[in-house]
Image (cartoon, helix red, strand yellow):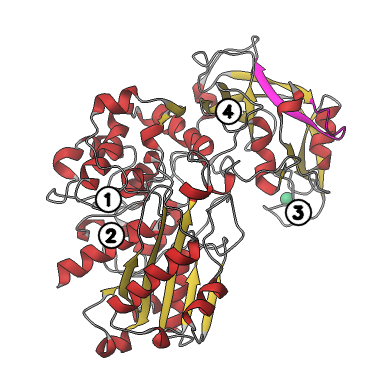
Amino acid sequence: MAANRILPVVTEENAFFWQAARQGRLEISRCAECEAWLHPPTGVCARCGSRKVAPVEVRPTGRVHSFTVNEQLWNPLQEPPYVLAVVDLDEAAPVRLTTELVGVGPDEVEIGMPVRAVFEPQDADDRVALVLFEPDPERETDPGQTEVELVVPDRAAFAAPSIVSGDPPERSAVISGLGQSQVGRRIGRTDLDLTIEAALAAIGDAGLCPADIDGISAYPGAGIGGPGFSGPDIYDVQDALGLSLGWHHSGAGGAGQLGAVVAAALAVSSGLARHVLCYRTVTEATGGKGGAKGSGSTGGMASGFRAPGVYGWFMPYGAYSAANWIAMNATRYMHTFGLTREQLAGVALNGRRNAGLNPKAVYREEMTLEDYMSVRMVTSPLCLYDCDVPVDGSTVVIVSHRDTLPDLARPPAHIEAVGTALRGRPSWDQWRDLTTCVAADCAAQMWGRTDLGPGDLDGAQLYDGFSILTLIWLEALGICGKGEAGAFVSDWEDRLSHAGEFPLNTSGGQLSAGRLHGFGLLHEAVLRCMLLTR
Ligand code: ZN
């Protein structure tokens, strides 16, 4: 049993937790000054700033806050199905632990179920025991014990005048050119080759030549995540195109994939560059194992791999993928708002219908609700069609200063406002309201930087790496009220098509057009803006 686990990297900060578990105790870090419970442990109190923090033993019991039944084989040593859960600790609220639930059938788990810890010593490291949980027969299930205050977007505020005095600096930036390489499943070309194809197309689309490009920005840059995830290094792209740069930037930190575009907009607004080449390139279909996703992928794990940082709290239990972590959001959302799988299917069915009009989409054949309902589960409640499809491809946009308009081939797409805020916990399981995510923070900030509101939108291209995320974005942006996105997308046939009242993910999105990791959606949004304003 214990030999199937990927172990966490043991650090000075977290060693006490694993060591206490080895001795059959649950210890959580607490602030001696303000008594806040702190997890993961960092050696400082996030509430009051005190360094007087120390482990305190707590009762090893809790309640299931959310769960998923994982059906996907991620690690050959850990056979599915198995049950993963986020557990609210009874004595250390608001701390939660991601864990594996044992001693319970996949059909028996429910939110609010009382559980108690089972400590599982690891043969490979005598400093470590994992903290699994099992049902606690001495208490009753009570979902009410797991309730949290929901984050409800203030839709009235979203139509209020901008809180930024003068024009926000991003409004100095325009998107002047678009380029996209060949896109497909396992096309077997290098990430640099695909990036150069897309870059030359985008530079030409803007009416520019490589000598005009004086900035470069990419998410995430080389060496991050599993095989095929990161794309080429920005300096390899610079060198290949012979660029002379005033500004350059890459990295996995920052405001997600489009953080690369936001950074470029700020760079041109501040005069560090005039034309920035922004790219996102993936070769995950060729490089990965098809089902493995993102930086949580097991695709690139060598033997002896230990899960670093935050992954050390998830991967040892078998929560290997963003699919598992986000499935917990989906389960919690369904519990809170009564969302059904038939409603959630609207995101995937709309994507597939729209992909039929996109020659580059990888999945274009018709999909029915019956197809969706009968396809295999990946990690409940997310089935195969709720998870995007790894592809090879590169997308490039050119971000230019608006003063360069006379040099451009055609009217560009203007940037009205951006949002990059991160105010809640940067964590998959400690985020308080799992029916939303950081989308709520950055959407609110974006609307605060413009006089426009959700009612002014002519449609949207919203992230659909997993279908539930599109629902979360619809609500975060105020397009739907809290809890109403399921009903909104269930009317996909009329409402969400190119000709509908609210065209959504018109290229097919990542679910059907392919996982171009945000930039495919940006490409489609800019294309539609350029068509609408032409
Ligand atoms: Zn404190």
Q: Amino acid at mark 4?
A: Ala
Which labelled disc corresponds to residue 524? 2
Judge whether residue 498 is colored magenta.
no
The answer to whether residue 45 shows anywhere in this view is yes
Q: Residue at x 62, y 38 (%)?
A: 94
- Does 232 sit above or below residue 287? below
Q: Which residue is mark 3?
A: 44
Q: Does 179 sit left or right of 68 as displayed?
A: left
**Do the CB atoms of the residues marked 3 and 1 lie less than 8 Å apart?**
no
At 27% from the left and 84% from the top, the residue drawn is: 408
Looking at the rendering, the stretch of residues picked out in magenta corresponds to: 121-135
Q: Earlier in the sequence, mark 4 or mark 2?
A: 4
Q: Residue furthest front?
A: 188
Location of mark 4 (residue)? 85
First reached walking from the N terminus: tag 3 or tag 1: 3
Q: Which of the two residues, 384 or 84, is positioned nearer the viewer here?
A: 384
Asked if the residue at tag 1 contacts the one at tag 4, i.e. Cβ–Cβ closer than 8 Å, the answer is no
Position of residue 308 in the picture relative to residue 422 (left or right): right
Q: Are marks 2 and 1 in contact (CB under 8 Å)?
A: yes
